Amino acid sequence: MMRSETLAQLAGVARAHAALQQPQSTFAALDGALSATIGHRLFTILVHHRAQRESERIYSNMPDSYPVQGRKPVTDSQWMQQVMGRGLPYIGRNADDIREVFYDHALILSLGCESVLNIPLRWRGQTIGTLNLLHQANWYEVHHIELATVFAQMAVPAVMAMSLAAEPSS
């Protein structure tokens, strides 16, 4: 993709931050921008609830298969340690990688997704969630990480605002 096209996608996400319908406007802009610049079939955003040891899905471009507010337990798996613990991206390149890492691998594979790119959402040294892109086999490469990380960090304000709004008031 040409540099000016990538910049236009980044600017579109930045403009979405000003919309009143948050966080949906920002998440939808991210979905479109990531589709145009990196590509995906399935795109989700998860928030990490550290105290409850759960991750919650707050955005999905396939809500019938992966509904919003679905939760999954945080385990001590190698993937969880890498992505959530150390804040490092993960690339799974094929169906074997999907089966090895995700308990819902049958559903993922049934959607035609055989590769994954998980990018941590980071704030103040902590992983607060993940941006998750899934596509056909061998789609994601190391060169995708840098741009995906920029987009992931652009999700942080909407994720943080959503988390603050969900906290009980005192």
Image (cartoon, rainbow, N blue to C red):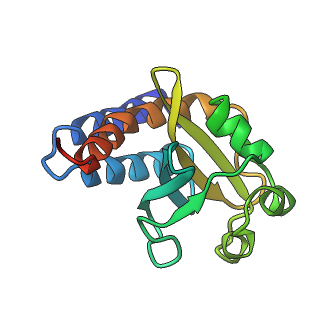
The x, y position of residue 24, in whole percent, is: 28, 54
Residue 2 drawn above or below residue 133? above
In the image, what residue occupies the spot 57% across and 49% down?
53
* Residue nearer the viewer, 43 or 33: 43
User: Is residue 30 or residue 44 the one in the foreground?
Assistant: 44
- Furthest residue in direction front, as rendered: 170
**Horizontal and vertical percent position of residue 112:** 68, 71
Residue occupying the point 49% across, 51% down = 46
Q: Compared with residue 33, is residue 10 higher up or lower down, i.e. above or below?
A: above
Figure check: 76 above or below 103: above
Q: Position of residue 109 (x, y in %)?
A: 72, 71
Which of the 4 image quarters holds residue 89?
top right
86 sits left or right of 22 in the view: right
- Residue, far top: 124
**Residue drawn 32% across and 44% down?**
163
- Whether residue 89 is visible: no
State which quadrant residue 73 falls in: bottom right
Asked if one can make out residue 71 in the rendered structure from this viewpoint, the answer is yes
Left or right, 26 with respect to 118, comes to left
Q: List the single residue furthest toward the left.
A: 20
**Label total for image:** 0
What residue sits 73% from the left and 60% below the top? Answer: 102
Q: Quadrant of the C terminus?
A: top left
